[in-house]
Structure formats: C-alpha cells, structure tokens
Image (tube, helix red, strand yellow):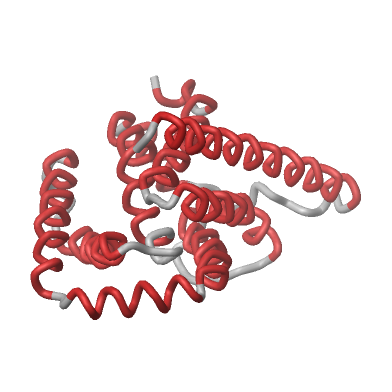
Amino acid sequence: MTEHSIQTKLKNLFRNFSLMLLCYFLFFFLISMLQTLYPDLDLKQYEQTDLMRTLKEHPYKFIFLASIAAPVIEESLFRTLIKPSQANLKLFVSALAYLVGLMLIPEEGHWMLRYTLLFLSIYLLYYALGELIPEYTLQRITRWLHKKYVIFWLLTSAIFGFVHIFNYVENVQLDLVLFIMIFPRMIAGFFLGKLKIENRSILWPILLHSMNNSMVLIFMFRYIF
C-alpha cells in the first residue's frame, strides 16, 4: 500500500466520521423539534438496562466489547458482504460461528478467557474454510455480491439498526420510539458501508466503528470510573 493510498484512505475515514457525526447532530436536532411539537412523545420509555449493568459492574469488559469486540464482529457480519473479497466471505462465516459460540460457551468463566477462546476459534475456522470451500465457489459468490452491492449496502445498514432493538427490549417489536432509538445505528451502518466501498477493506469500517463507539465511551466516562 503506497503512502498516497494510505493518505486517501485516511481522508475517507475522517470524512465519513465527520459526515456521520453531522447526520447524528441533524437527526437529534429534528428529534428535539419533534418533542417540542409532540410533548407526549416519551423517548425515555426504553432503556439499555443490560448494557448499563455491564458498564457499572464490569467497566473493563464494557470498554473491550464496545471498542474492540463489537466493531470486529459486527463489521464482519454486516460489511463483509458489501463488495467482498474471498477473505471477506470466510470472515463472514467465521463471525456467524462466533455468534453460535457465544451462546454455547458458558458465561460463568472469566469474560476475557471466554472471548479469547472465541476469537481463537474464529481464527482457526477462518483458515479451515480456505481448505474446505473451493476457490471457484468463492469467486462466483463474490462476483454476484459485487453486482448487488448497493442492495446489500442499504439492506445491511437497515438490519444493523434493527438488531440494536435488543439493546432496549428482549423480544422482537417495533414502534415509533424504538425506531427513533435505532435510527442513528442505521446512519452509522450507511457510512460504515460507504467507507467499505471506498477503501475496499473491512479494516477501515472496523476502525470507524471503533471510533464511533469510543466517542460514546468518552461521554459515558463518568459512569465507568
């Protein structure tokens, strides 16, 4: 990778980060206007109870999940299918396996050991897939996904937002307030996908995702320590 290429990709990173923050600002400005017009609109009826409990009881675990684990896994799930490489497809399958492992490995053990085992399993599965799946199969899938990249970009942005409903409720449901709560995640998903397309590597949306979550951590700092 040339110095010029790195500079261009860094510019894309910070431009998309700035645009994402601007969209957040505009969105919350519109929501404040909406609350003025409709004072009965209660945006506090849903709270991220489990997240706040983790934040208070296990602050270092929360920081690890927000700034490292979540960006890596969520981008591996949602952005790898946007103009993917063959490596992206293997990473997508590995991330799905991570979710299964998350349900199977008991939570009683130390959280760092649990996630170390999970990431090690992903690493091994990633390389195993290269031997198990024929290269021509991966090539055919990548070509098809490249043709449909706009659909997958927008679709994964929407799904990325909707899965965050479970930050607020345990069961699948949707109303106006919940939609308002998850819409910023859709905004984030749009720009994360945009950066994947522009920089042609999954590493950049992972970095942008980590920057976004780390910014939230700064605002939540008073709850951490």
Query: In the picture provided, is 42 more to the left or to the right than 184?
Result: right
Task: Return the residue found at the far right.
Answer: 37
Question: In terms of depth relative to the viewer, which is nearer, 163 or 96?
Answer: 96
Q: Position of residue 16 (x, y in %)?
A: 59, 41
Rendering quarter of residue 101: bottom left
Whether 99 is drawn above or below 72: the answer is: below
Check the picture and name the quadrant holding the C terminus. Answer: top left
Residue drawn at the location 16% of the way across and 75% of the way down: 133
Q: Position of residue 20 (x, y in %)?
A: 63, 42
Whether 44 is drawn above or below 127: the answer is: above
Question: In terms of depth relative to the viewer, which is nearer, 40 or 25?
Answer: 25
Residue drawn at the location 53% of the way across and 64% of the way down: 153
Check the picture and name the quadrant holding the N terminus. Answer: top left
Residue drawn at the location 16% of the way across and 52% of the way down: 118
Q: Position of residue 186 (x, y in %)?
A: 59, 56
Q: Position of residue 211 (x, y in %)?
A: 47, 34
Query: In the picture provided, is 153 more to the left or to the right than 6?
Result: right
Residue drawn at the location 47% of the way across and 62% of the way down: 163
What is the total number of numbered labels drawn onto the structure image?
A: 0
